[in-house]
Every structure is written in structure tokens, then in C-alpha cells.
Amino acid sequence: MKISRDIQTVSDLKQNASKLIKQVNETGQPIILTLNGKPAAVIQDVESYERMAEAADYRLTVRALREAQDHVDKGGELIPAEDIYNKLSKKLRIDLEQPLAERRDHTAS
């Protein structure tokens, strides 16, 4: 990170949005935006964001699998997948029977 380049104010963003977006796309480095001298937001290129999100999803999945295995190893009850799907469907208010592409189209509107 080059501080003079990668830390900018919100005012800089207002005046130079295209330039800053081009910068994150070319360098792959995020830009930290400050408001009143304090970090307020980050601008990041899509590719880096997707890699970061995938890595976070992977870590969460591994953690959940380890917890589930530990639960079973300690004699815990197994829960049928259908029960899990029903609970998730209610909690997330989505129809897990509906194809993913259709769910994305529906939530985007």
C-alpha cells in the first residue's frame, strides 16, 4: 500500500471518481476513503473483492464442517438435511427449491 496514493478523502472521490476507480482496477490495491480524517470506506476492484469473498466463504464452510464433525464425534444428534433446508428457507425467507439463478433475478428487482 502506498499511503499517498491509496488513502484518499471522500471529497477526492467526489472530484475524481473515474480516476480512482481506474486506479484500483489497474493496481489491484484498495483505496481507503476518509471522512473527517477517519477511515470511512474502502473502494476495491471486483476481482479482488470476489477472491476475498470466496476465501471468507471457504473459511466459514470449513469452520462449520469442523463444528459439525466435532458435534457428531461427541455423540451429538444428526439432523436430516431436509430439516436444515426448511429452517434456512424460513430464516432467510427464500425458497431453496427455486433455482439459484431465479432467486438472484428475484432479489435484484
Image (tube, rainbow, N blue to C red):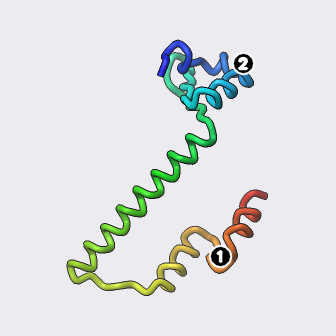
Q: Residues within 10 Å of mark 2 (few under 14, many from 20)?
A: few
Q: Write the residue at 45% across / 52% down.
A: 56
Q: Residue furthest left?
A: 74
Q: Nearer the viewer, mark 1 or mark 2?
A: 2
User: Residue, x 75% and y 65% (percent of image)?
Assistant: 106
**Residue 58 location in percent, x, y?**
44, 58
Mark 2, residue position? 16
The location of residue 33, given as percent across then percent down, is: 57, 24
- Pick whichever, 13 or 45, lies toward us: 45
Image vertical order of residue 3 relative to residue 89, above or below = above
* Residue 85's disc number: none
Residue located farthest toward the front when viewing the structure as drawn: 26
- Which residue: 37% across, 66% down? 64
Q: Secondary structure at mark 2?
A: helix
**Inter-mark Cα distance, 1 to 2:** 42 Å
Across and down, in percent, residue 107 comes to 72, 61
Say what amino acid the circle numbered 2 marks: Asn
- Can you name the residue that lies furthest to the top here? 4
Specify the amino acid type for callout 1. Answer: Asp
Which residue is identified by label 1? 95
